Image (spheres, helix red, strand yellow):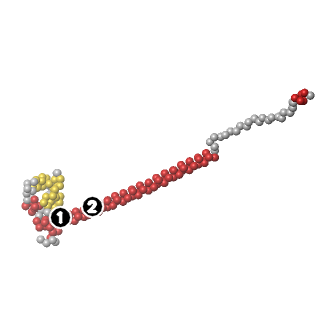
């Protein structure tokens, strides 16, 4: 079958009326009760039933179900190969995207670590300058205190005036024996 016929078969398959609810039994004997076909693909049917959604491949279904949904093994094989190729491309793109994201995350983590280190160094410098400023202010306060105490004596000497005692000259009296004897 030619590749230009694939879209026609797919279109014909999709235009097939979907059964409201059917029971399906695979060649292996597994049963799907009250299943509603939600989508028909060239390699199988998607069905919804009480416990979930499944894809039943035509190769696993009896001949009458295959004929009912116009199954063509060649188209199914081409479709499966196409889907596998798409899946492979998607998986490769996702893997590349994951690697790019991991690299970006690693770079971001490294940048964050560098920034945190720079912030820590800047904070340390600020802290040192603050301590130096405080030490300088403390030293200036101590120097000012010393300067004040050098100008003001610690002990005050109080001088009290002493009473002034003045002596008066006494008259000179000469008492001599000679004069007394005279």
Q: Quadrant of residue 82?
A: bottom left
Ranked by sequence position, the earlier of labels 2 and 1 is 1
Image quarter for residue 59? Answer: bottom left
- Residue 168: x and y, percent? 82, 34
Q: Dot 2: what SS?
A: helix
- The answer to whether residue 177 shows anywhere in this view is yes
Q: Is residue 96 left or right of residue 60?
A: right
The answer, for residue 10, to whether it is visible in the render is: no
Asked whether, in this view, residue 160 is left or right of residue 87, the answer is right
From the top left corner, tell me how far across and down residue 169 is, in percent.
83, 35
Q: Where is residue 166? Give x, y as percent.
A: 79, 35
Which x, y percent locates residue 87? 20, 63
> Between residues 163 and 61, which one lies in front from this camera angle?
163
For the point 9% across and 56% down, which residue is it? 26
The quadrant of the picture occupied by the N terminus is bottom left
Mark 2: few, some, or many residues within 10 Å (few <14, many ≥20)?
A: few
Number of labels in the image equals 2
Q: Which residue is mark 2?
A: 98
Alpha carbon separation for disc pair 2 and 1: 20 Å
The residue that appears at 7% across and 61% down in the rendered structure is 63
**From what the image shows, is residue 65 above or below residue 151?**
below
Q: Which residue is mark 1?
A: 84
Of 29 and 174, the residue lying toward us = 174
């Amino acid at each position: 079958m030619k590749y230009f016929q694939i879209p026609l078969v797919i279109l014909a398959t999709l235009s097939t009326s979907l059964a409201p609810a059917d029971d399906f039994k695979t060649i292996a004997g597994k049963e799907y009760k009250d299943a509603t076909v939600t989508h028909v693909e060239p390699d199988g049917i998607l069905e919804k039933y009480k416990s979930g959604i499944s894809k039943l491949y035509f190769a696993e279904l009896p001949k009458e179900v295959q004929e009912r949904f116009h199954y063509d093994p060649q188209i199914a094989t081409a479709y499966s190969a196409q889907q596998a190729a798409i899946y492979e491309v998607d998986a490769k793109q996702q893997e590349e995207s994951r690697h790019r994201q991991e690299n970006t995350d690693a770079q971001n983590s490294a940048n964050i670590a560098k920034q945190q280190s720079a912030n820590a160094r800047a904070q340390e410098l600020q802290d040192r300058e603050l301590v130096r400023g405080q030490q300088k202010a403390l030293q200036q306060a101590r120097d000012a205190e010393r300067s004040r105490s050098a100008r003001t004596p610690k002990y005050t000497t109080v001088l009290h005036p002493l009473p002034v005692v003045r002596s008066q000259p006494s008259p000179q009296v000469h008492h001599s024996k000679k004069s007394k004897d005279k």
